[in-house]
Image (tube, rainbow, N blue to C red):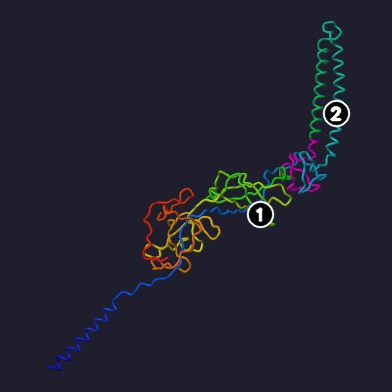
Amino acid sequence: MRYELGVLAAAMALMGCSQGEDGAAQKPPAESVRTVSAAEVVLRPMGASQEVSGLLVPREEVVVGPELSGYRVAALLADEGDAVRAGQPLARLDDGLLQARIRQAEAALAQARARARQAQAESARVVGLEGQGVLSDEQIQQRRTAAASEQASADVAAAQLAGLRVEAGRMTLRAPVAGVVLQRSVRRGDVASPGAEPMFRLAREGLVELSAEVPEHLLGGIRQGEGAAVVLASGTQVQGQVRLLSRRVDEKTKLVQVRVTLPVRQDLRPGGFARASFQPEARPVAAVPEKAVHFEAGGPQLATIDAEGHIRKTPVTLGVRTDGWVELRSGPPVGTLLALGGGAFALEGDKVLVHGVSPMQGHRPAAQRGQSLTLQDGNMQGSPAAGRQETGLRS
């Protein structure tokens, strides 16, 4: 009997130990915590320069071509790169045949005027002879008609000669404005044709400017009349000024044309490449360190840290970048903690412990802590949200 009781007690003791081990195994494992460094969303004055590229173009291009056809080019009087005055000859056509026609027209005019004078004299002799029986009325009228006809013939000959002389003046191609010859597409011996390619292209007054296209969302940082630093392909930097900011946005590309005037220089060659940098006025915007931003398939994100110390992946819209900082056009509120370094790649919901917050190079007003950010008219706007608690975070 005692033996059976001892066996039963031993069995019950073993069962109790087994249940204790099972209970211990069923306890949830402790949550792993990663220690991370952090930064905050801050207000920071940012006026990063915006750089665009484009081509050098003449501010106003003037083309020069022949007004007559069938004449060969006899002489070229200007070449590419030449500075010319208004009215300066650029090329001369062969006018040998035209001069012969002019001499012939001059002779014809002289004959017509001689006949007109003779007819006028004969008409003058019959003045006052009407009704005297010396000449019939018909003969008198014939002389007067002949005088008028010969005078008309002389006028026609004079007009023809004047037309030929006008053509002679057009045999010389002249610069309509002062400027610089950009292109000469004619050679000596070519036959002039008004419908062909212009013989010369001029830049009016030698003015060359930068023509660039700017994305619509960057227009806020560019204003008409402000300065721009332009760097040529050679590396030379010149100072320009925004002359034109188009009011039309291209429907397909969503780009806006910008024209930047440049000083008159010999090294400004139309067709060349150049870059322009615009320096807009700095304004306070929500910003984060660039190293806090990581890119996923859905776009840029921040690893924010909530009040309980968990990672929350937050999509953001980025703006200008400068000095290692990037503007937030939309995203978390000012004052939100962000995981840096390896913490930026932590998974959604991971528990983290903040051991240090990077020094802020901006301003975080208390009134804007705990406000969500939206993009309105290109500026970050705040909307009330629950304030961030520091519970569970160690700084």
* Residue 53, magenta (yes or no): no
User: What residue is at 85 percent from the left and 17 percent from the top?
Assistant: 120
Question: Residue 139: x, y in percent?
Answer: 83, 13
* Residue 174, magenta (yes or no): yes
Question: Residue 40: x, y in percent?
Answer: 45, 60
In three-dimensional space, the C-alpha distance between marks 2 and 1, rounded to whole angstroms, equals 65 Å
Question: Residue 211: x, y in percent?
Answer: 63, 49
What is the three-letter code of the residue carrying label 2?
Ala
> For mark 1, does the 10 Å Cα neighbourhood hold few (<14), some (14 to 19), or many (20 or more) residues?
some
Residue 135 shown left or right of residue 47 in the figure:
right
* Residue 108: mark in rendering: 2
> In front of the other: label 2 or label 1?
1
SS class, disc 2: helix
Q: Nearer the viewer, residue 116 or 24?
A: 24
Q: Tag 1 or tag 2, which sits nearer the N-term?
A: 2
User: What residue is at 79 percent from the left and 33 percent from the top?
Assistant: 166
Question: What is the quadrant of residue 141 in the picture?
Answer: top right
Find the magenta span and give its range. 167-195
What is the three-letter code of the residue carrying label 1?
Val
> For mark 2, does the 10 Å Cα neighbourhood hold few (<14), some (14 to 19), or many (20 or more) residues?
some
User: What residue is at 37 percent from the left and 66 percent from the top?
Assistant: 392
Question: What is the quadrant of residue 23 in the picture?
Answer: bottom left
User: What residue is at 83 percent from the left and 37 percent from the top?
Assistant: 98
Seen in the picture, residue 273 relative to 160 is either above or below; the reply is below
SS class, disc 1: strand
Q: Quadrant of the C terminus?
A: bottom left
* Residue 231: mark in rendering: 1
Residue 7 shown left or right of residue 44 in the figure:
left
